[in-house]
Amino acid sequence: MDIWEQLCLKAKELYHPQDVSPFLYAHHVVCALESENGEIFTGFCVESCSGVLDLCAERVAALNMYVNSGQTVVKRLIAFRDRPPYGGGSGMPCGACREFFMQLSLKNKDMEIMVDYEKRETVTLEQLLPNWWGLERYENSK
């Protein structure tokens, strides 16, 4: 079993869409990521009636990683709804999640994001955020 299958199975464990309340819907997008030291962390999406309160599965997984281990670097990430990414943009983190990962650690520019699970096709975060605005700030912080 390769790491992508491990990540996919961990994420699938969280997939069971449900209404949490008349205002919150959860577990309809799931994510698993591999941290720099090889640990796997998971998260699921929580959507509300007010978009600013939404929590994406990818950011929840990253926060679980940080809270539980202090790590900020992600090696690999898979996210999906009812089935693993199948190309055509499925499985892509939203813009807010992309931005969050870049701000969490510049090393995350090299993280692999699953695009097509069957083909094992991935992209890097840097490919999704070319010429990212924050590079100068990272350079100035050294």
Image (tube, grey):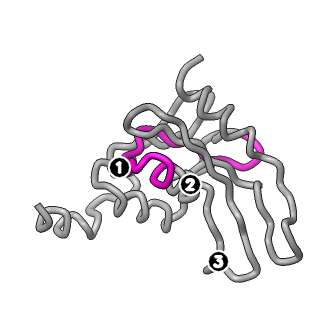
Which residue is disc 1 drawn over?
A: 108
Q: What residue span does the magenta drawing correspond to?
A: 65-83
Q: Where is residue 1 in the image (x, y as percent from the top left)?
A: 60, 17
Q: Can residue 57 be found in the magenta stretch?
A: no
Q: Which residue is drawn at 32% across and 55% down?
A: 105
Task: Tell me the kind of residue under disc 3.
Answer: Leu
**What crowding class fits label 3: few (fewer than 14 Cα within 10 Å), some (14-19), or many (20 or more)?**
few
- Say whether residue 4 is left or right of residue 128: right
Label 1, label 2: how far apart the Cα atoms are: 13 Å
Label 3, label 2: how far apart the Cα atoms are: 15 Å
Which residue is disc 2 drawn over?
A: 58
Secondary structure of the residue carrying tag 2 is helix
Note whether 123 is above or below 53 in the view shown. Answer: above
Q: In which quarter of the image is the C terminus?
A: bottom left
**What crowding class fits label 2: few (fewer than 14 Cα within 10 Å), some (14-19), or many (20 or more)?**
many
Task: Tell me the kind of residue under disc 1.
Answer: Asn
Which residue is disc 3 drawn over?
A: 53
Q: Residue furthest top?
A: 1
